[in-house]
Amino acid sequence: MTTERRYDIDWLRVIAIGLLLIYHIAIVFQPWALFIGFIKSEQSLESLWVPMTMLNVWRIPLLFFVSGMGVYFALRKRNWLQLILERARRILLPFLFGIVAITPLHFLVFQKYYNLPLGYMPHAGHLWFLGNIFVYVLCLSPLFFYLKSRTESGLMKAWSSLMSHPLGPLSVAIFFVIEALLVQPQIFEQYAQTWHGFYLGLLAFLFGFLFVYSGSSFWQTVLKWRWLYVVLAAAFYAIRLSFFEMQSPSYLMAIESHCWILGVFGFGYKYLNKPSHTLSYLSQAAYPVYILHMFALYLGAWFILPLDIPLHLQFICIVSFTGLVCYVLYEFVIRRIGIFRPFFGLKGKRPAVQEGQLSRTIG
């Protein structure tokens, strides 16, 4: 198995989580925000939804792909028991802690903002993703360890050969099309705590592992054909905007999503596969920020929405407030106080030398 350090994969995780923050903040300014439990602005910025709906078909599937890739790298130095214990510590513990101590915070802010009776409500909330990932690790690790033991098999060589053709990575989209046709989700982008989200995530997690398992062939293919994948994705997106009012049939959105993701992997491999001090810091911070961001977002909406300032400025202010609160909590509390670190997916104490090393926590 390859021992190459893949900085682009870490960058893509960081970028995807950053986009997640912006996407969730954009929901505050949509007329339907209240129906899915978000604090809602009295005025709408529906124009924000045009770029957001492009992001929404691939941002969560991308994280599932990257998480599967993270397990591939984790298997290099772990046996089955070590992998499960490590994932329990890095994923299951923050997931359970978040249900009882983090997600109730933004529900309390929501209740306070709308003058509702205050009540404690343990809930997975946005941390549903972690629960799914841990289940995928349990379900798929026997297959992954089997494949690990057969890196020179004919099956692996055939898979690597398929991935060396531009249609090879594209052909994987058929599995996501089948999922969409069988499950028939009412809204393709409704991943959270739905069977559609579970099965789509399972497929993305599996193929994320298999893409890295194929060796360099997959990466060379997406590098060479990255523009083809992006052009195809943009064409499907244009069709969705022009003919389906942003919600085309799920099987078409599955293909669009897959094309965007292949293009993102290709551009990431070309431009992001290099170390930096910024990446070292952000790759550590991304997981705690993901866990905390909804509380910071709701708090920002509570303070900023009542202000008599332009709507676009409100959006910018909530983005800035959310980022600042997450940074302060991470840098001065979670990162520095050892007792908090395990509950946010970090090692129990801050090693002086290894603090900057890259983390593949979500996965």
Image: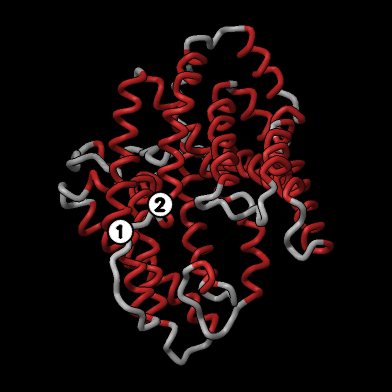
Q: Quadrant of residue 157?
A: top right
> For the point 46% across and 27% down, which residue is it?
139
Q: x%, y% of residue 64?
A: 52, 40
Please name whichever residue, 107 or 24, is drawn nearer the observer in this view of the structure.
107
Q: Relative to 116, is 146 on the left or the right?
A: right
On screen, 348 above or below 78? below
Mark 1 neighbour density, 10 Å: few (under 14) some (14–19) many (20 or more):
many
- The kind of residue tagged 1 is Ile
The residue under label 1 is 102
Q: Are marks 2 and 1 in contact (CB under 8 Å)?
A: yes
Q: x%, y% of residue 108?
A: 32, 71
Q: Which mark is residue 8?
A: none
CA–CA distance between discs 2 and 1? Answer: 9 Å
> For the point 44% across and 39% down, which residue is it?
133
Please name whichever residue, 257 or 1, is drawn nearer the observer in this view of the structure.
257
Q: Which mark is residue 127?
A: 2
On screen, 148 above or below 55? above
Mark 2 neighbour density, 10 Å: few (under 14) some (14–19) many (20 or more):
many
Q: x%, y% of residue 106?
A: 35, 67
> For the point 75% across and 45% down, which residue is it?
251
Of the numbered discs 2 and 1, the one sitting upstream in the chain is: 1
Q: Relative to 43, is 170 on the left or the right?
A: right
Q: Quadrant of the C terminus?
A: top left
